[in-house]
Image (tube, helix red, strand yellow):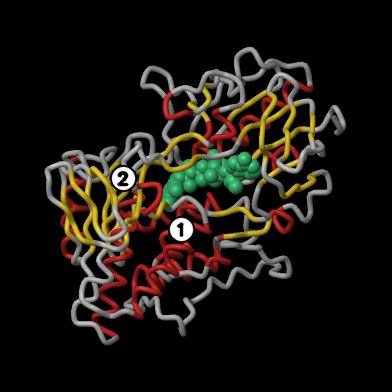
Amino acid sequence: MTGPADRVLVLGGGMAGVACARRLAEEDVAVTLVDRNDYHQFQPLLYQVASSQLPAEDIARPHRAIFQDDATVDVVTAEVAEVWLADRGLVLADGRTLTGSHVVVAAGARPNFFGIPGAAEHAFPLYSVADAERLRLHLQALLRDAAPGTLDVVVVGGGPTGVETTGALAELTDALRASVRLDQPGRITIVDRGDALLGEFSTHAQEYVVRKLREAGAEVRLRTGVAAVHPDRVELDDGGSIAARTVVWGGGELGSSVAASAGPEPGRGARLDVRPDLTLDGYPGAYAVGDAANIPSGASGTWPQLGSVAQQSGKWAAENILRERRGEPARPFRYKDKGIMAMIGRNAAVAEVGKRHHQVEGPVAFAAWLGVHMMLMSGVHSKTDAFVTWAWDYFDRDRTATIEATSTPQRIAWGDDQADRPHITVD
Ligand SMILES: Cc1cc2nc3c(=O)[nH]c(=O)nc-3n(C[C@H](O)[C@H](O)[C@H](O)COP(=O)(O)OP(=O)(O)OC[C@H]3O[C@@H](n4cnc5c(N)ncnc54)[C@H](O)[C@@H]3O)c2cc1C
């Protein structure tokens, strides 16, 4: 094995891994951050890429650019094949091994297809920039075949991902109806097994979301499960089916496979069960954070898989590593709850803000959404005011969405150093 013994290894350069590495870099701790991509991907805006509202480069910031001023952070672009928690080591797919004084597993999540036949093969998950690009290119290709029904879409899952994607696709369809050649550009249907969309929200917010999606032209089908996915239709568990050549999967997630096979028996959702201080029982010097971990929240179970939980837990793990180095005990994670929110489209957003989840809708909810997203981006972009301008423009105005090959979505004028470009590959 190679690698300095006092180096902290961070597996994953998402929200949790970046927050962890940044905090350690502030104290000049040597960090090796390993990610399969040479860029950080901002998942909350993936649906904007899929629906052609934003170019992919805008939500894929190169790790080297993020850490350009952090001399102690070494970025390695490689697939991690195995995690050796007992040795605090990572085995890379090319055979290299790295070891350190600590290892932080921040490998995120993957879609959960629940074993539904055809879902993994034919549905489009929305977990990575490559996923979003794949969906965008698929829709663009279908647009060339302008027969009625070609652009019908089924979105599976009524959580925030499903709701936001449905809203964005309904807008896209509407824009196509208004601006181009199609009378019936497509039908967008969101399907969920439960009694409501956005199960975590209040009944009032759930009703608001259904109303707004229907106003935007989407169909909402509740108490309806998906039994199988085919290239041209979705089979439902009530015996019916919906014809669609595009099925977007927002149906749930599992902890990343490399984390799940790291050693400890995975817990709920194939995530690693961590102790309150984010360490892994029986593996000194090993931490798990963000979507890869089940982080205890006290009596009520675990914190949800949210960007703010990922960012705060990544930073907290760094603080605990710094405490360990000073010979102090690690402290239990304390989450500052910012609330939950979803943007349904222009002029429609819902949020339950703060610890008490005070409910707001419309522009006020959008402002809350914007505040939280700026905070999530702050570790990655040096300036976020350009994002605010872009987002208000999107929310407020009737700017036409398009998936036509010839047009380019409006860019966010980040003002960051763009010399280092992400290498986005879509297979
Ligand atoms: C479509 C979508 C919309 C969302 N919207 C919101 C929202 O509006 N607000 C909110 O708070 N949260 C939102 N979330 C949740 C939020 O994005 C996640 O909770 C957060 O990104 C988790 O951060 P993480 O660092 O744990 O994982 P990730 O951000 O997923 O990062 C994991 C990293 O690990 C890398 N990796 C994984 N396995 C390996 C391996 N074997 N080898 C090398 N590298 C590896 C990946 O490439 C990735 O960069 C959304 C999620 C999705 C999917």
Report the amino acid beneath label 2: Gly
Displayed quadrant of residue 136? bottom left
Taking the view exactly as shown, the residue that stands out farthest to the top is 282
Q: Estimate how packed mark 2 is, as few (under 14), some (14 to 19) or many (20 or more) residues with alpha carbons within 10 Å.
A: some
C-alpha span from label 1 to label 2: 15 Å
Residue name at image x 54 percent, y 28 percent = 260
SS type, badge 2:
loop
> Would you say residue 411 is visible in this rendering?
yes
Q: As drawn, is 99 to the left or to the right of 16?
A: right
Relative image position of residue 317 (x, y in whole percent): 64, 29
Of residues 27 and 160, the one drawn nearer to the viewer in this rendering: 160
Asked which quadrant contains residue 282, the reply is: top right
Q: Do the numbered discs 1 and 2 sit on residues whose CB atoms are within 8 Å?
A: no
Residue 46 x/y as whole percent = 46, 58
Crowding at mark 1 (Cα within 10 Å: few <14, some 14-19, many 20+): many
Asked where in the image residue 275 lies, by quadrant, the reply is: top right
The answer, for residue 307, to whether it is visible in the render is no
Which residue was labeled with disc 1?
Answer: 46
- Residue 89 or 92: which is nearer the viewer? 92
Q: Is residue 163 left or right of residue 193?
A: right
Nearer to the camera, 403 or 114: 114
Image position, residue 411 (x, y; %): 53, 74
**Image x and y of residue 47, in percent:** 41, 60
Q: Decide which of tag 1 and tag 2 comes sooner along the chain.
A: 1
What residue would you read off at disc 2?
Answer: 159
In the picture, measured across the screen, residue 39 lies left or right of residue 44, that is right
- Say whether mark 1 is within 8 Å of ligand 1: yes
Q: Could you tell me which residue is drawn at 61 percent across and 62 percent down?
A: 424
* Location of residue 165 with respect to 309 vertically, above or below: below
Pointer 2 residue Cβ closer than 8 Å to ligand 1: no
Image quadrant holding the N terminus, namely: top right
